[in-house]
Image (cartoon, rainbow, N blue to C red):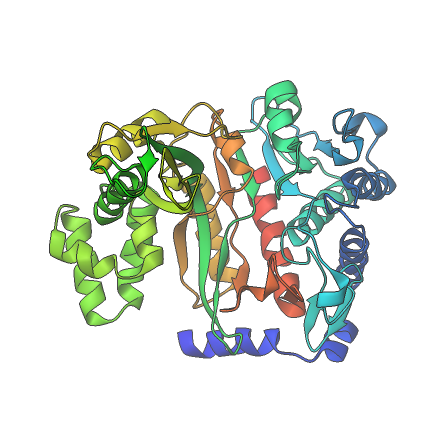
Amino acid sequence: MRHVTTALLAASIAVPAAAQQAQLRPDQQAFRALYKELVETNTTVSSGSCNLAAERMAARLKAAGYADADIKLFPGPAERPQDGGLVATLKGKDPKAKAILLLSHLDVVEAKRADWERDPFTFIEEGGWYYGRGVSDDKAHGAIFTDAMIRLKQAGKAPKRTVKLALTCGEEGGPFNGAKWLVEEHRDWIDAEFVLNEGGSGKADATGKPVSLAFQAGEKVYQDFTLETRNPGGHSSRPRPDNAINELAAGLVRLAKNDFPIILSDTTRAYFTEMAKLSDADSATAIKALLANPADAHANEIVSRDPGWHSTLRTTCVATMLEAGHARNALPQRAQANVNCRMFPGESVEKVRGQIVERLGDASITVTPRASENPKAAAPPPPLSPLVYGTAVALAGKHFPGIPIIPTMSTGATDGRYLNAVGMPTYGMPGRFGMPDGNGVHGLNERISVAGVMKERDYLFDLIVAYAGK
């Protein structure tokens, strides 16, 4: 039965575009129009406006019955007023039940028209796909969450919990981050028991057949460190043993050869438990051994051959840039490297700095954390609670029968880092299946399956309704 239902789901995602558009229900047609408007609003840092996108979504919310008092439109800072966003609130009927927050960023990465096959800021449906910058990252969520707020309002019955929506700017870069600003300046606008966010993209195979759903709970923290050595230098015809380049290079080699210790959270333990079921015999045996004993060096060696698994198991630090010397015929007076770390949730910058120093094994190499936008507090991974995770799993069985749902920890970063840091557990919602090529996210010809995004919308709406009623 599992194979039959999986095949049916894959077939539904492969329905030709013309047939899909004709088959859209009236509510799906309304969603498509909202989604199209959002994608066709340019929100790049260079020439776009998140304010305009927020204003257009606010107009749709008001048309659905939201009062002005229910919607807060906020601009960016004086030097970047176009980097604003909105917060909308649907008040629940139980004052003791804490709110849930739907979070999506409006901004998108740059898209050069000359490099794309289609206009990146025209919403195009072709061959069963929607094309355009942001159709996946992250305007699909922005459209689905705004649409959900509209549908909840139009239902005419207040949910038990208050439901909030935050559409912000700056997740993809730029000088102002709206999620960070809301946390620091207007926590009361967005305060919630837990947050629904991006980051839970599952996997499809090369034919589009769904393989697994993903429920993201926790994400690594980005942090750069500057490593530097300094020496008196001198004439290159008289080499000295204390060479700045040699000392830094030797330290970097030691750093590369000494992995950081394995850390298992509830999320990563659940992830590897599920991956053992989907892996070849040798990998499955090694995964099970490592879960039983994280100090098992042989199991660690086998599991860590997969770069993704290696990164999921621990904090990682890798040299990404080098700068050294001042003349071809002179001994280097200074050598500097940037080491980029992706820290396991809950690890502090100072702790990781100490681990780098220990692995370098040379007191002459200074290690300095670079300034970052990271929260000062190191947030632990959010729990896989029965309310949040259990509800998502139960509903996934209804919408995606036969498809396993796997807890994941993102090795990248989202705006969830700001909310997790202040005690608002933030989760990347399942419902989407990413193709092996990444669907062009952050690259050329970004796309998302038409049938897939419609199924994701149905699933997430039911999930939001379930959360709001519990």
- Residue 338 seen: yes
On screen, residue 95 above or below 329: above
Image quarter of residue 350: top left
Residue 441, horizontal then vertical, whole percent: 60, 59
Residue placed most toward the observer, 129 or 343: 343
Please state, as top left, top right, bottom left or bottom right, where the N terminus lies in the image: bottom left
Residue 208, horizontal then vertical, whole percent: 53, 74
Residue placed most toward the observer, 141 or 465: 141
Residue placed most toward the observer, 335 or 279: 335
Residue 183, horizontal then vertical, whole percent: 59, 24
- Residue 288 seen: no
Image quarter of residue 314: top left
Q: Is residue 431 left or right of residue 66?
A: left
Residue 320, horizontal then vertical, whole percent: 42, 47
On screen, residue 18 above or below 120: below
Q: Is residue 187 left or right of residue 332?
A: right
On screen, residue 205 above or below 190: below
Q: Residue at x 81, y 40 (%)?
A: 61
Image quarter of residue 443: bottom right
| Number of callouts | 0
Q: Is residue 253 left or right of residue 328?
A: left
